[in-house]
Amino acid sequence: MKSKYVTLSATLIFFATSLFAQNRAKNFVGVSFGASVPTGDFSKADAGTFNNWNNSAGFAKTGLSIGVEGAYYFLPNLGLAGVLNFSNHGGFSNMDAAKLGDSYTDAFGVAYTTVSTSGQYNSLSFLVGPQLSFPLNKLTIDVRIVGGLLKSISTPTMTVQLEDQVDPTFKQVSSGASAFGWQAGAGLRYALTDKVGLLFRADYLNSTGVKVDNENRNNKAGRWVTKQPMSWLTTSVGLSFSLGK
C-alpha cells in the first residue's frame, strides 16, 4: 500500500517538471463538507456462506465528510498539500444484524442467534503529499496524492448470543486503532475574489484497514473480523482562502 502511494507521488512530481512555465498557483487553505460513499469490501453487506465467511465485509454506509485542507507551493505549480478529514460511515442496520444472526446460526449449528449492535464508523485522516495545480484565470485545477495516518475513532460493536452453548456470548468491540492510508483526488477552485473562492473536490481513500478486537471468541466458526479494510469515495464542496499576495 505504501509503495503504491510513493509511486503515484513520484509520477505526479515527474509530470510537474514540464509545467513550471504556467502561472504560479497561490498558497491556500480550504474547508469543505460532502458525502462519503464506501467502496470495495468496506461497502459489502454480506456475511458469506458456510466455511466461506466474509471477514472483510464492513457493512459501511454512505455518510458525512468534513475536511480542512491546504497547500504551500515551493514551485510555480507544485506544492505540498495537507489534509485533515473526518468521515462517518454509519453502523449495522437491523437488516445487517438479522443477516449476521442467520450466519452465526448456520456456522454454529444452533436453533437461533441473537445479534445486537451499536455504534458507527467514525474516523480521522491526517494526510500529506504533493499537489499539482493549474491556474487558468479564475479557475484552478488541483490534482494530488497524499498519504499518512488513518485513525479510527470508533467502529460498530456487535454482541452475539448463541442458544445452548457453553460460552454463548462473544463480542466484536469498537476499534480505536490506526493504520496507513492514502488518498488520490482532483478538484476545482473558482475565485470569487482575490482571497475567497469556491471549492469542489472528488477524492478516493484506501487503507488495508484497522485492527479490530473480539472478546470471548474461542471458536473460529462464522464471520470473525480482526482487521477491517476501509476505502471510500468522497465528493465535497466548500470555500478556499488564498494566502499571501
Image (cartoon, rainbow, N blue to C red):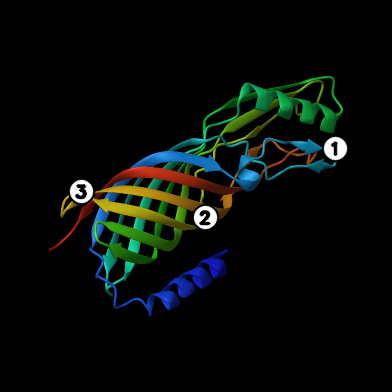
Which residue is disc 2 drawn over? 179
The amino acid pointed to by label 3 is Leu
> What's the CA distance linking mark 1 and mark 3?
58 Å
The numbered dot on residue 192 is: 3
Comparing 147 with 192, the one in front is 192
> What's the CA distance linking mark 1 and mark 2?
30 Å
Which residue is disc 1 drawn over? 50
Q: Quadrant of the N terminus?
A: bottom right
Seen in the picture, residue 64 relative to 82 is either above or below; the reply is: above
> What's the CA distance linking mark 3 and mark 2?
38 Å
The amino acid pointed to by label 2 is Ala
Q: Quadrant of the C terminus?
A: bottom left
Tell me the residue at 51%/48% (across/down): 177
The picture places residue 27, in percent across and down from the top left corner, at 23, 62
Circle nearer the viewer, 3 or 2: 3
Q: Can residue 227 be seen? A: no
Quadrant of the image occupied by residue 80 = bottom left
